[in-house]
């Protein structure tokens, strides 16, 4: 792997002008930020764009632009052997067939590693940046935000695989700390009752999703909700208060028969960006990633990029504005999907949001939905939404247990989308595609056939 990273380093060193193409999610933005900062430090001429997916429109544009080198980050594995006219390097972590191995393609899957949890797009980009110059180890914090944004800590409740090396770099460079803590989202900025209300992995039986039950639970444990006028958050609590809440949740899970496995998921590693201020959206990697998801997914990638590159003034203010819109859209999107109702089939379940949920957040909503109490965990969930171009965006999500039984959504969606002249890809546990409108039923039938084959064989 180091040798491959060095091959990419040589290509970068020899190029004067480099164009970065990256993905619109938190992993994509952090990958793009790492690549741009690396090139800035090298004194290269560079430019960057953030895209929803690598389709023909993007490729045709690149073909006319004639860049000396294109650096694809957090995407690109699907075209590594195509378009030789585009001189390129790729730092990606999406599934790819063995024939996509090329001297300019750095991807954990090419080295027998699993890109859904061992290394993210930002992580792959970071490892090349570090191979260029060890001083770039200060960029490891961004790589961890990318990995957390892609939920790479979900499988083991901590980062594993090649991510471990990046965590170590972050600690050595003084930008990262890890602490064992409760795993729910919003420890730094969510008022306590909301923090518990949105708790989803594991769900708190009888409490998640119900604000009144959260308030009642906190009152029963004699935990103040406010300090003066300010709502208290998880990080405002003292050790004893935290202990009381954690042990109560664990007891609730065990007494309701959720088992040791669910209960053990309450605690895990938290990744803290220790140079940032506590109690802000930037201190905990999960919250930082969500802040970034609020930008490029709404066409404002420059905002997220500048925050990654260190702006704490006007760009951060803009990001925080976008964050409140994003939160609102997720709550509404989840509500909308629930009302649409999930349709069950033998080997999958799906819902169609049409114009009700933006195509850029349908994946997040599908994921959240699969994590709610009343949704079947035995079937993968597929969400459809219309795109601005008149196509259909597909997002598919599975549970770890389905993956352990042999499910690989990336293969399923890549094949089915290709049949319909669309594009698809991703990871075993989460994949996406774009297909023509009106082909949804045909797509579902193909997907169902593939899933059946994977789960019985
Ligand atoms: O495009 P990309 O690789 O960056 O995104 C990874 C996707 O996989 C994210 O949407 C993330 O939520 C999803 N994922 C998941 N469960 C995991 C790992 C990743 O849903 N255990
Ligand atoms: O868009 P969504 O969040 O559902 O994507 C899930 C995963 O599938 C992500 O890793 C994304 O990069 C990947 N994907 C892809 N090709 C597409 C759409 C999504 O590789 N056309
Ligand atoms: Zn990614």
Image (spheres, rainbow, N blue to C red):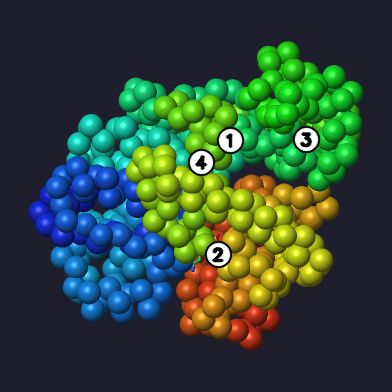
Disc 4 secondary structure class:
helix
Which of label 1 and label 2 is nearer to you? 2
- Where's residue 157, x and y in %? 60, 34
Q: Residue furthest bottom?
A: 438
First in sequence: mark 1 or mark 2?
A: 1
Residue 38 shown left or right of residue 408 in the figure: left
Of residues 151 and 455, the one nearer the viewer is: 151
Residue receiving disc 4: 288
Q: Identify the residue at image location x=75%, y=26%.
A: 226
Q: Residue at x 22, y 74 (%)?
A: 65
Quadrant location of the C terminus in the rendered image: bottom right
The answer to whether residue 197 is left or right of residue 65 is right
Residue at the image position 55 percent from the left and 54 percent from the top: 322
State the mark number for residue 193: 3
Q: From the viewer's perspective, is residue 192 above or below residue 438?
A: above
Q: Would you place residue 187 above or below residue 380 in this image? A: above
Q: CA distance from mark 1 to mark 4?
A: 21 Å
Query: How far is disc 3 from disc 2 in space, using C-alphas?
Result: 29 Å
Kindly tell me whether mark 2's CB lies below 8 Å from ligand 2.
yes
Check if mark 3's residue and mark 1's residue have beta carbons within 8 Å. no
Q: CA distance from mark 1 to mark 2?
A: 27 Å
Please state the horizontal and vertical placement of residue 104, each as a whole percent of the image.
23, 56
Per the image, the residue denoted by label 1 is 156
The mark that comes first in sequence, 2 or 4, is 4
Whether residue 28 is visible? no
Tell me the SS state at disc 3: helix
For mark 3, does the 10 Å Cα neighbourhood hold few (<14), some (14 to 19), or many (20 or more) residues? many
According to the picture, the residue beneath numbered tag 2 turns out to be 360
Assign a secondary structure to mark 2: loop
4 and 36: which is toward the camera:
36
């Amino acid at each position: 792997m180091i040798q491959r990273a060095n091959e990419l380093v040589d290509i970068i060193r020899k190029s004067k002008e480099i164009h970065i193409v990256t993905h619109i999610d938190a992993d994509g933005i952090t990958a793009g930020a790492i690549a741009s900062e690396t090139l800035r430090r090298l004194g290269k001429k560079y430019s960057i764009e953030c895209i929803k997916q690598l389709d023909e429109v993007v490729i045709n544009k690149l073909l006319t632009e004639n860049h000396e080198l294109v650096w694809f980050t957090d995407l690109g594995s699907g075209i590594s052997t195509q378009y030789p006219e585009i001189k390129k390097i790729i730092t990606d972590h999406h599934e790819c067939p063995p024939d996509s191995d090329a001297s300019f393609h750095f991807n954990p899957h090419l080295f027998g590693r699993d890109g859904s949890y061992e290394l993210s797009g930002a992580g792959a980009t970071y490892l090349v940046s570090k191979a260029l110059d060890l001083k770039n180890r200060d960029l490891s914090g961004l790589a961890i935000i990318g990995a957390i944004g892609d939920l790479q800590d979900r499988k083991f409740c901590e980062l594993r695989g090649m991510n471990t090396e990046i965590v170590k770099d972050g600690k050595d460079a003084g930008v990262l700390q890890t602490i064992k803590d409760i795993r729910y989202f919003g420890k730094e900025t969510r008022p306590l009752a909301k923090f518990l209300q949105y708790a989803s992995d594991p769900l708190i039986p009888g409490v998640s999703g119900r604000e009144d039950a959260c308030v009642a639970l906190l009152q029963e444990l004699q935990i103040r909700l406010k300090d003066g006028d300010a709502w208290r958050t998880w990080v405002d609590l003292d050790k004893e208060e935290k202990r009381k809440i954690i042990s109560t949740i664990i007891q609730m899970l065990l007494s309701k028969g959720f088992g040791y496995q669910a209960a053990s998921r309450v605690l895990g590693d938290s990744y803290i960006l220790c140079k940032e201020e506590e109690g802000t959206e930037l201190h905990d990697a999960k919250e930082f990633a969500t802040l970034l998801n609020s930008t490029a997914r709404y066409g404002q990638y420059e905002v997220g990029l500048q925050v990654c590159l260190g702006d704490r003034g006007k760009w951060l203010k803009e990001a925080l504005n976008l964050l409140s819109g994003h939160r609102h859209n997720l709550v509404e999107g989840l509500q909308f999907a629930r009302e649409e109702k999930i349709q069950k089939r033998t080997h999958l379940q799906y819902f169609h949001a049409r114009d009700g949920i933006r195509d850029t957040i349908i994946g997040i909503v599908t994921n959240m939905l699969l994590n709610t109490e009343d949704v079947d965990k035995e079937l993968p969930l597929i969400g459809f939404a219309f795109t601005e171009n008149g196509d259909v965006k597909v997002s598919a999500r599975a549970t770890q247990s389905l993956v352990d039984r042999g499910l690989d959504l990336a293969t399923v969606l890549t094949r089915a989308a290709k049949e319909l002249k669309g594009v698809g890809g991703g990871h075993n546990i989460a994949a996406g595609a774009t297909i023509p409108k009106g082909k949804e039923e045909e797509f579902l039938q193909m997907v169902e056939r593939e899933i059946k084959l994977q789960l019985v064989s």
